[in-house]
Image: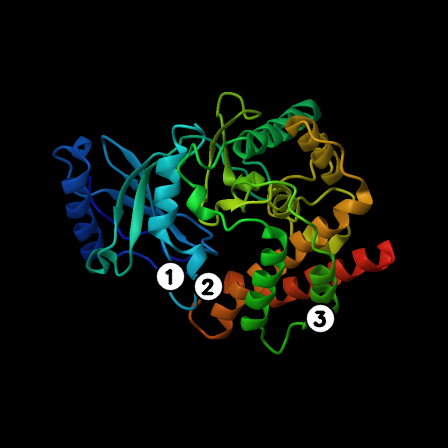
């Protein structure tokens, strides 16, 4: 199968991170030494996945195997979110306990191959939902509800894993996870600050003053979104894989749920929030954020969380999302990436901070 450069931008030009034929040849030689199943194959067909706001991801198609490669982006990076060795190790250790993780096959620390470290995993075949369902996939309301419940079930199953049994206890840092997260995301937001976004002082001060004690400690994904799960092509209400484990750690499970729901845009949300939607959680039959929390509590066998007690988690999830967006925008602001998709991320930051402030005002905080 002939090699070809990874997909370039729509204008025919090359994007940051596209692989040329020399890089593909080096990669193929490296893989052939480490994955015996490749046999006599020479060069893979390489396609770069669209998006890539965090790590860059490529599909490597061989006659024998369908693989996925992940590597860090260029420019300013949050080290914890781009540690390929750590991510690969997490997949390997979770595999016996959580069948939804992709199978990690090989990790490369040698920058001579692609210019950075990377790892390769087996591709999970299925459907990944984006802003809207793909053509031909029409989820009836009862199917949308069933998918939401399976989404919650997948998160509950992860949170029930004993970190020690999975060999991941080293990721934990003891109690105080919520407070550390507030401090960490505050620092990241401030370091990534540019003059065109708010300081968010009131939101930060409130989060620091109201961080709760940990609800528990378990393996958490830290980016558990509907567009990070793979659906069964034969029954799209069932989940067959969970992707993007770069921020997984051991911590408070409610903080994981908070991060997931920051992306959960409902049909009745305001137009600005709906404009930010990146997964089809607005469809008829989809659970509301509140219903997701209730289903999660039932699945975990814990008492229902009063709406007033959930305010911290909701505000934290949105502020964390603002910090992530600002970190990405900083790369564009410094011209470390030319991706035009990042040009307006500073506007997203404005909105997310405003949304946090509105929640606090309405709660009387």
- Secondary structure of the residue carrying tag 2 is loop
**Residue sitting at the far front:** 174
Here the colouring is: rainbow
Please give the label number shown on residue 201: 3
Disc 3 vs disc 1: Cβ atoms closer than 8 Å? no
| Mark positioned earlier in the residue sequence (1 or 2) | 1
Q: In the displayed structure, does residue 266 sit left or right of residue 17?
A: right
- Secondary structure of the residue carrying tag 1 is loop
Q: Nearer the viewer, residue 211 or 198?
A: 211
Disc 1 vs disc 2: Cβ atoms closer than 8 Å? yes
How far, Cα to Cα, is label 1 from label 2?
Answer: 7 Å
Please give the label number shown on residue 15: 1
Q: Residue 227 appears in which quarter of the rendering? A: top right
Q: In the displayed structure, does residue 331 sit left or right of residue 319?
A: left
Q: Is residue 269 visible?
A: no
How far, Cα to Cα, is label 2 from label 3?
Answer: 30 Å
Please give the label number shown on residue 339: 2
Few, some or many C-alpha atoms within 10 Å of disc 3 (few <14, some 14-19, many ≥20)? few
- Secondary structure of the residue carrying tag 3 is helix
Few, some or many C-alpha atoms within 10 Å of disc 2 (few <14, some 14-19, many ≥20)? some
**Residue sitting at the far left:** 40
Q: Position of residue 339 (x, y in %)?
A: 46, 63
Q: Residue at x 29, y 59 (%)?
A: 116
Q: Position of residue 208 (x, y in %)?
A: 69, 62
How far, Cα to Cα, is label 3 from label 1?
Answer: 36 Å
Q: From the image, which quarter does the N terminus lie in?
A: top left
Q: Residue at x 72, y 66 (%)?
A: 205
Q: Is residue 52 above or below residue 290?
A: below
Q: Residue at x 34, y 34 (%)?
A: 103
Q: Nearer the viewer, residue 305 or 140?
A: 305
């Amino acid at each position: 199968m002939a090699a070809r450069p990874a997909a370039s931008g729509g204008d025919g030009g090359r994007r940051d991170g596209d692989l040329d034929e020399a890089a593909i040849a080096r990669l193929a030689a490296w893989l052939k030494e480490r994955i015996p199943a490749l046999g006599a194959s020479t060069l893979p067909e390489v396609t770069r996945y669209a998006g890539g706001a965090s790590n860059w991801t490529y599909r490597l198609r061989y006659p024998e195997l369908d693989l996925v490669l992940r590597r860090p982006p260029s420019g300013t990076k949050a080290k914890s979110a781009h540690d390929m060795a750590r991510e690969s190790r997490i997949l390997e250790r979770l595999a016996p306990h959580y069948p939804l993780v992709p199978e990690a096959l090989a990790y490369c620390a040698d920058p001579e191959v692609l210019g950075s470290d990377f790892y390769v995993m087996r591709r999970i075949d299925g459907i990944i939902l984006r802003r809207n369902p793909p053509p031909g996939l029409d989820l009836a309301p009862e199917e949308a509800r069933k998918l939401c419940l399976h989404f919650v079930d997948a998160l509950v199953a992860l949170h029930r894993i004993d970190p020690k049994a999975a060999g991941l206890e080293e990721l934990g840092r003891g109690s105080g996870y919520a407070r550390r997260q507030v401090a960490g995301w505050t620092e990241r937001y401030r370091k990534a600050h540019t003059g065109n976004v708010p300081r968010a002082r009131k939101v930060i001060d409130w989060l620091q003053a109201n961080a709760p004690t940990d609800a528990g400690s378990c393996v958490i994904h830290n980016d558990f979104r509907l567009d990070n799960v793979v659906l069964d092509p034969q029954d799209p209400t069932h989940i067959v894989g969970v992707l993007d484990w770069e921020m997984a750690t051991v911590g408070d499970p409610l903080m994981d749920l908070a991060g997931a729901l920051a992306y959960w845009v409902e049909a009745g949300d305001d137009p600005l929030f709906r404009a930010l939607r990146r997964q089809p959680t607005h469809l008829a039959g989809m659970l509301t954020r509140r219903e997701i929390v209730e289903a999660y509590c039932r699945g975990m066998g814990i008492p229902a969380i009063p709406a007033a007690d959930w305010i911290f988690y909701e505000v934290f999830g949105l502020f964390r999302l603002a910090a992530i967006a600002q970190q990405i925008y900083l790369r564009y602001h410094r011209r470390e990436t030319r991706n035009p998709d990042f040009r307006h991320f500073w506007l997203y930051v404005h909105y997310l901070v405003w949304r946090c402030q509105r929640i606090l005002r309405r709660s009387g905080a």
